[in-house]
Amino acid sequence: MVDLKNTDVALIMGSNMAENHPIGMKWLGEGRRVRGTKIIHVDPRYTRTSVVADLYCPMRSGTDIAFLGGMINYIIQNKLYHEEYVKAYTNASYLVADGFDFQDGLFSGYDAAKRTYDNKTWDYQYAEDGTTILKDPTLQNPRCAFQLMAKHYLRYDIDSVVKITGSPKNKYLEVIKLFATTSAPNKTGNIMYAMGITQHTVGSQNVKSFANVQLLLGNMGRPGGGINALRGENNVQGATDMALLFHIIPGYIDSPMNTAAQKNLLSFVKAVTPGAAKVPATNMAEFRAAVAAGIPNSGFKINTSKWVVSMLKAWYGDACTEANDWAYHYLPKRDAAKNYSHIAMFEAMYKGEIDGLFVMGSNPVVGGPNANKEQAALTKLKWMVSVDLWLNETSDFWTFRAWERPHGGTHHTETFEPKDIQTEVFFLPACAVYEKEGTAAQTGRWVQYRWKGADEVGQSKSDLWIVDQLSKKIQELYKGSTRPEDEPLTKMTWGYGHGEEPEPINVGLEYSGYFVADGKPIAGGFANLKDDGSTACGNWVYCGQMATKPDGSLLYKPQKRDNKDNSKTGLGLYSNWGWCWPVNRRIVYNRCSIKPDGVTPWEGDADRVLIHWDPTNVSDPTKPDVVGAWVGDDVCDCAKTAPPDKAVPFLMRPEGTGCFFAAKGSFKEGPFPEHYEPWESPVKNLMNSQAVNPASKIWEPDKKGTTADYPYIGTTYRVVEHWQTGALTRTMPWLAELMPNMFVEISEELGAIKEIKNGDKVIVSTTRGDIEAVACVTKRIKPFVVDGEQQHMVGAVWQYGFKGYATGDPANRLTPHVGDANTMIPEYKAWLCNIRRA
Amino acid sequence: MTRLMTNLYDSSKCTACRGCFTACKDSNQLPAVFDKSYFGGPGNGTYDSKDGDTDANTYMMIRFNETEDPVDGVRWNFLKWQCMHCMEPACLAVCPKSAYTKLDWGATFHDEDKCIGCQYCTYACPFGIPKYRKHTDTVTKCTLCYERVAEGLTPACARSCAPGAVKFGYRDELLEEARIRVKFLRANGFPRATIYGETELGAGTNKLYILTDTPDKFGLPVNPQVEGNTVFWQDWVQPYAGWLIPLALGGSAVSFVTSRVVANKNEEHGKGGHA
Ligand code: SF4
């Protein structure tokens, strides 16, 4: 966040940063003060962020790829890219396999029946050895990634783009030109985004478009650069790190599946280690030897087996040995044919496939897509445990008020009476964040320990206490069992202190990692992890956050509070404030902050160099013959002693470079982002004849609204006065006073058409349901001119429900069950609706 | 004379998060009063609380002014709205009970113990700020957090402002800062940027604004005036008001002014006298 002050141009797109991330916004303000940072805001609405931006450009919701594709095309056609950076630090020069093709919105390998791709051809050309990727350093070969990308985006000329996005042409050009100034070697530009980018059927590809822009302009891995996800909630970062998603285990490793191909640890690590599938090893010892010898095109993830075994060791302790395949069989395996994302879970629940549900810090009756259906799904449960500060809409989903629906809705929605709902509901009162201790990881991966600020209220308990008790009680129930299927519980290590209240520092030690022999923390970080049972580490990316103090006690680095900036040029690294994963590296890919030779700064940008190559430095006194190392104010994001020509900047990628062409399984819908319309859209796709993302999962094809009944674009968002589903803030009188009522915003033009005045009660409808709201008729929303026709938008705040002081219908009763092809994040941000006076 | 201390509000930095609004309510322990039927101001289409004015339980608020013109397009001008702590306060001039005093460092202090709720100040105030509170039978307004300032703290609003749009300090220093800022803004897309409060009402006010546009675009009077009859009040009515008003409230005298006072005592009201 502090790094925002180092940027020359900030592009805020799909985020209402000033409202939802006011403290982050402060650092852009600092940038303005110290270096005249310019701020661009691109959004369907003129918001409080637009007010503080230097340049605002509207864009129809769901057309980000067109918007950014036009930017990519303009940058390439006008040779505005940072050529030296592109050649050295990206895969621009890599030749792509001949079989790779793109025709009318479809990449090679599409299976229309299954709505999936076979990505075999999404690969590079290799030399005879089958592993060396062929390249053309001049970027002239028509099959190189750069030329293929240039060709792909040639269709995205300015006029075609604004026809799709509805942006005023002059504003659009202004945005492109201003942001492209950051390709100068002495300038950097930063992109900030939030849910306005991700909550689409093309969410992941929206972000990939950012990556292409930033790599072209040479903005990755440099202070003031980067692509920054503004997380929707503090510690969402931490939750993701700890694998609060169904498809990964801690540290972003794919979670194991129940397939024959992943039946044991060896087959699993072969599957999840890039390039390892063909390694001929028949046991872990041979695999270990192959890793030691090096696997081509694997990148740093070649070490995955060490992270997995260390995690198993942390979880199963003495019961995790070479002899029992490191307890791999204890790990739950997901069904390869199933999807466990939010939408899928509620669909399964609705079908009666799920008996029980734990809801912690979540309120799906307000926050879930297609909330009418999700609320109905809760009635199919046998039991539900709700853990929250207040009885929220989800814990009270069975009450009378929960089923009140606006009169005169356009169609029937399922409602229930409390007496007909059999779900047994338990409520556990939880502590607020200030009433408990522990770490939180923010957007910039800084992990900061927070001490308790106030005592808990009544019988409320911290989440850690609740989970700890739950685990202990379950283990107690299985105590003495000798059944092998109970072993994942009976053999699980569990113990975080001796008192009633678990000690966060003990949890921290487990995921930071320790040597099994003496229990001492692995202070040196994940390079020390082994897959021979000698190290235990719950989450490799956090390895090294714990060290031993001279007096033998634990040094928990997230507790550090040294507010002195260690950057000699005032970049605001603050490396001794908290701790940052990985290995306290504050700016990732920082190898790019200096020229490829490792010693020359980018022209005119000496102040933003983070690391450089010192050919005489001996970094490890125990190895005096290893001379030369990367040094600087930040921790280098490349092999410490690898000379500049070997020190690749994007370690985690098998290629070692930033990728314009996202090979193989990187994305479900193709190596280059292509514009598709949202699932429900008022217009046809002007770029190709595919309507929606061809790889997206459509859950309810019959619920697709059409313009005949639902002519307007709907979108959702938050306001600064309320927090997420409002459970915290709608119960706060002063905040409820500021935003007391559910409201929707429409343009004066739409207001005139529908005879809706400001303050009128209106009904907004989709195929999923109806809501009642107060209309805010405003100049800040304007119709979009798309392909010559006016398209209107209805904007709905999604933070209301029937509990608390500030109440109103949840906007998510309107949103669809359809999601991004990769992440399954719901398409909250673009759908079709109708509106009329109530 | 003690060096004047004041608040400087920079509209170009404000994100209308309303942290100051909440901090003010917290610091002054003012209750939330909300009307479920309400959204924005009628015909307003913006995010104003209530009808965009201070009231008995709201000493300060952020006002949202939507403007549109062919050159700049849509703009949303935020304004922190509260007592301006005028250098020569009309409220002080008209108050029959001398409930108002000017503190040496600049705050216009209103003593609720002396106040009889007659609301002459409300009518005299060029901004219509003081508001009647029924259960205490007094008017209320922003105190410039004089108690906090006395303890060496900054006013609650300034303390809470994350983007640094509200500052508290010496008036001369803040004025200097404001001049530099306005110069910068004029050169960077806001040619009509201006300082408000330096010379308004002659002597100026002890709250300073940096505006990105002309005052009317922020709903402020471009040339605020103290009504002419204020002088009349001060010289003629005030000396007698001490006994005139109780009589009036008792219903024995019928005059233009006093009947207005009686009527206004019936309910708390959110509108200034000039509305
Ligand atoms: S706290 Fe500051 S930014 Fe927020 S509304 Fe008040 S003055 Fe504006």
Image: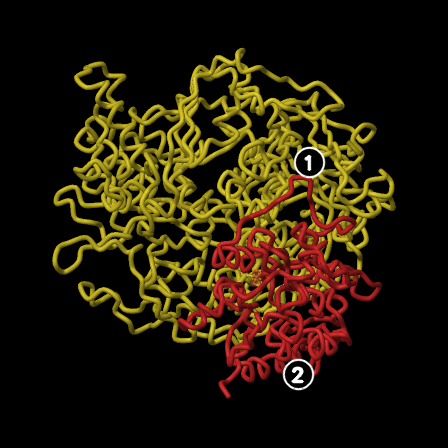
Name the tint of chain B in the rendering.
red
- Residue depth check, mark 1 versus mark 2: number of the one nearer the observer: 2
Disc number for residue A106: 1
Disc 2 target residue: B203
Please tell me whether residue A261 is drawn above or below residue B91 in the rendered image. Answer: above
Q: Can you name the residue that lies furthest to the front here?
A: B252
In the foreground, A621 or B70: B70
Mark 2 neighbour density, 10 Å: few (under 14) some (14–19) many (20 or more): few
Name the colour scheme.
by chain
Chain in yellow (letter): A
Q: CA distance from mark 1 to mark 2?
A: 71 Å
Task: Inspect the image, locate mark 1, and give the three-letter code of the amino acid beneath it.
Answer: Leu
Residue A101 visible, this orientation: no
Q: Can you name the residue that lies furthest to the bottom here?
A: B1
Please tell me whether residue A375 is drawn above or below residue A836 in the rendered image. Answer: above
Task: Inspect the image, locate mark 2, and give the three-letter code of the amino acid beneath it.
Answer: Ala
Is label 2 in a helix, a strand or a loop? loop
Classify residue A256 by image quadrant.
Answer: top left
Label 1: chain letter: A
- Residue at 23% over, 18% down: A478
Label 2: chain letter: B
Location of residue A566 in the rendering, given as x and y in whole percent from the top left corner: 35, 70
In the foreground, B103 or A575: B103
- Residue at 74% over, 27% down: A705
Location of residue B183 in the rendering, given as x and y in whole percent from the top left corner: 66, 81
